[in-house]
Amino acid sequence: MDRNEVVARARRAVKAAFLRGGIPYALGKGGMKPEAGVPWTLDGLDCTGFCAWALGLSRKESRIPGGWIESTMIVRDAKSAGGIFSATGDPRPSDLAVWGDRGNGQGHAGVIVEVGGGLPVSVVHCSKGNWNARGNALLETAATLFLRNGAIYVRCDLIEEIVEGSPA
């Protein structure tokens, strides 16, 4: 899968959630079947279940410590050597914006879908806040929430880089 496919999957999921009338937020749900047409289960979806699915991964991932994709693990993996995520100071569409558990609440993650001026402009993410405010946990929003909370930018090393001038 390449960067364009990740962004397209993220945006298709938002459209499908809207057409369904909204997806409820449910901690620990979704993202188990990357081949599925949508990331959620009947119970709902959470942020890292969505991110794993958008990246074409199962959130139950044997190549990461602990074998379960969640926000604190993504941050930890991105800051260590040998995992599947790497921290980057140069965010691009298909990278994740993420912060881990800080002891006072859950972390959060989303797929960056638009960048401008070296920073994320919009992010697709699944949150309880989206659910409470809009009746749909999965939305594309401005990146303000992630910028305000000091998110780091993380690249999945399994996503193919797009080489300019190469056949798609």
Image (spheres, grey):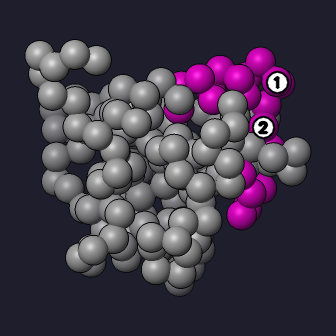
**Where 93 sits versus 12, above or below?**
below
Q: In percent of the image, x 53 and y 81: which residue is there?
A: 66
Q: In percent of the image, x 53 and y 29: which residue is there?
A: 9
C-alpha distance separating marks 2 and 1 = 7 Å
- In magenta, the rendered stretch is 10-30
Q: Which residue is mark 2?
A: 23
Looking at the image, residue 32 sits to the left or right of residue 153; the answer is right
Instruction: Residue 168: tell me if it is visible.
Output: yes
Numbered circle sitting on residue 146:
none
Which residue occupies the foreground of this view, 18 or 34?
Answer: 34
Numbered circle sitting on residue 20:
1
The N terminus appears in which quarter of the rendering? top left
Q: Secondary structure at mark 2?
A: loop
Residue 93 is situated, as x and y percent measured from the top left of the image, at 32, 34
Q: What residue type is disc 1 on?
A: Arg
Q: What residue type is disc 2 on?
A: Ile
Q: Quadrant of residue 64?
A: bottom left
Residue reaching furthest to the right: 42
The C terminus appears in which quarter of the rendering? top left
Which residue occupies the foreground of this view, 87 or 37?
Answer: 37
**Are the residues flagged by discs 2 and 1 in contact, CB closer than 8 Å?**
yes
Residue 12 is situated, as x and y percent measured from the top left of the image, at 59, 23
Q: Quadrant of residue 68?
A: bottom right
Q: Secondary structure at mark 1?
A: helix
Q: Quadrant of residue 34?
A: top right
Q: Magenta stretch containing residue 27, yes or no?
A: yes
Q: In percent of the image, x 46 and y 80: which residue is there?
A: 65
**Where 164 sits versus 127, above or below?**
above
